[in-house]
Image (spheres, helix red, strand yellow):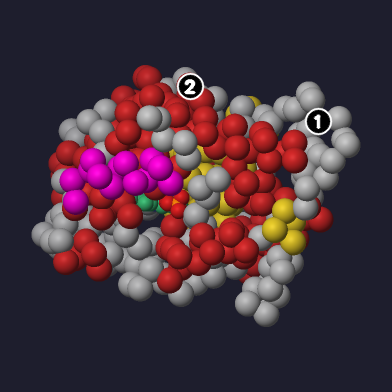
């Protein structure tokens, strides 16, 4: 029987993926407190159903930085997708396009920027881990040339954060699964300190990321819109607005970087209140249900992204599996929208949701 929801897909993926690869996808940092909290927080939010509105003609499409997507769920950038299916990023991009949404290609992809663009039918963003200026310049210019619509700079990895489950498994990233865009430039790959345990979500010990004052340099390389991914606080969100960033992803990286931070959904409402009129806000970390999408949109997100579920879809059936995963979320979200008496995503507002336990969740809005 086909999986009915994303948790079914997760269970199937756990059965079918090789143990170390499953663990690489599933793991989070240290005690995995933030990863659990991402789910718990969504579950605590209550939704107020409203009836007797005419909700027959619903339109769940939206735009992200001017690009139309059929529903407000996109694919997050995640490294090494070929571990779940040999077609990897090409399959995920194909599935996303068929479902009518956007795919974010990670720096750490098995297929190259161009190989993914060839098969994609939906809009693409390119996620950047900045390593050094030359590599960044090469990658973002190629992304622009290949038709990617924005650069999504991940900022929440100032140093690597090995997952303890991966360390126990002696898990090592396989070069063929992670460095497709630099396949013919081994000299550039070698700058990455191979020899140190090369765990995915990579950042070498001497990683020097970008700083605020260099965002203009990055933007000027392509002129493409700039999205900053990994924002967790109001202060950093305000800095992004002041530096003219076009969009932010409120994200704790699925709990994979610093453990003990709040869930993404907890931080969303105050961030949206501070900067929602100055840039576009997206959210990821823990989205598993169409109802979660609705909650995030009510609290100020324009769209959400999913990370681990793309591997579950890939393991289930490559591009078809990713499409199926997204279609489940699409149907669930559409149904949820009808139940709160709305016809479009623009009609969603904070009053539709309740956050009951304000002691546990002091900043929830
Ligand atoms: C296996 C794995 C690899 C990831 N690799 C990257 C990456 O290369 N770049 C990045 O910005 N985020 C990466 N992420 C984080 C995702 O983009 C996203 O923030 C996170 O998965 C969202 O949480 P979710 O898995 O609960 O949906 C990765 C996540 C996973 C699970």
**309 or 2: which is nearer to us?**
2
Name the residue that disc number 1 marks.
55
Q: Position of residue 11 (x, y in %)?
A: 34, 46
Q: Earlier in the sequence, mark 1 or mark 2?
A: 1
Q: Position of residue 220 (x, y in %)?
A: 52, 43
**169 or 3: which is nearer to us?**
3
The secondary structure type at the circle numbered 2 is helix
Determine the main secondary structure of the stretch shown in magenta: helix
Residue 348 sits in quarter? top right
Q: Is residue 306 magenta?
A: no
Is residue 236 positioned above or below 151 on the image?
A: below
* Quarter in which the N terminus is drawn: top left
Q: Is residue 142 left or right of residue 200?
A: right
Q: Position of residue 212 (x, y in %)?
A: 53, 62
Q: Is residue 74 left or right of residue 26?
A: right
Q: Which residues are magenta?
A: 7-19
Find out if the beta carbon at label 2 lies less than 8 Å from the nearest ligand 1 atom: no
């Amino acid at each position: 029987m086909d999986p009915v929801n994303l948790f079914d897909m997760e269970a199937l993926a756990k059965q079918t993926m090789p143990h170390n690869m499953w663990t690489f996808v599933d793991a989070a940092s240290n005690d995995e407190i933030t990863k659990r909290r991402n789910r718990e927080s969504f579950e605590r939010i209550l939704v107020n159903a409203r009836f007797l509105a005419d909700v027959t003609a619903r339109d769940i499409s939206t735009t992200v930085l001017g690009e139309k997507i059929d529903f407000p769920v996109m694919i997050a950038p995640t490294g090494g997708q070929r571990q779940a299916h040999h077609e990897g990023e090409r399959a995920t991009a194909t599935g996303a396009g068929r479902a009518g949404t956007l795919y974010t290609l990670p720096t750490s992809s098995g297929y190259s920027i161009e190989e993914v663009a060839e098969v994609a039918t939906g809009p693409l963003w390119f996620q950047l881990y900045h390593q050094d200026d030359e590599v960044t310049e090469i990658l973002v210019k190629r992304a622009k040339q290949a038709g990617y619509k924005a650069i999504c700079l991940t900022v929440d990895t100032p140093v690597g954060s090995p997952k303890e489950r991966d360390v126990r498994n002696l898990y090592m990233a396989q070069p063929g699964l992670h460095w497709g865009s630099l396949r013919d430039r081994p000299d550039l790959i070698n700058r990455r300190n191979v020899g140190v345990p090369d765990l995915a979500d990579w950042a070498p010990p001497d990683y020097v990321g970008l700083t605020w004052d260099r965002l203009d340099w990055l933007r000027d390389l392509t002129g493409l819109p700039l999205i900053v991914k990994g924002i967790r606080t109001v202060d950093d969100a305000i800095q992004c607005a002041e530096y003219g960033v076009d969009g932010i992803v409120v994200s704790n990286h699925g709990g994979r970087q610093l453990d003990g931070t709040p869930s993404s959904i907890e931080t969303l409402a105050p961030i949206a209140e501070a900067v929602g009129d100055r840039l576009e806000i997206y959210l990821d970390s823990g989205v598993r249900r169409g109802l979660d999408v609705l909650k995030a949109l009510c609290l100020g997100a324009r769209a959400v992204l999913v990370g681990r579920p793309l591997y579950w879809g890939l393991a289930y059936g490559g591009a078809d599996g990713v499409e199926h995963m997204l279609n489940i979320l699409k149907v669930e979200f559409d149904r949820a929208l009808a139940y709160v008496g709305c016809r479009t995503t623009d009609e969603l507002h904070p009053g539709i949701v309740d956050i009951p336990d304000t002691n546990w969740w002091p900043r929830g809005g």
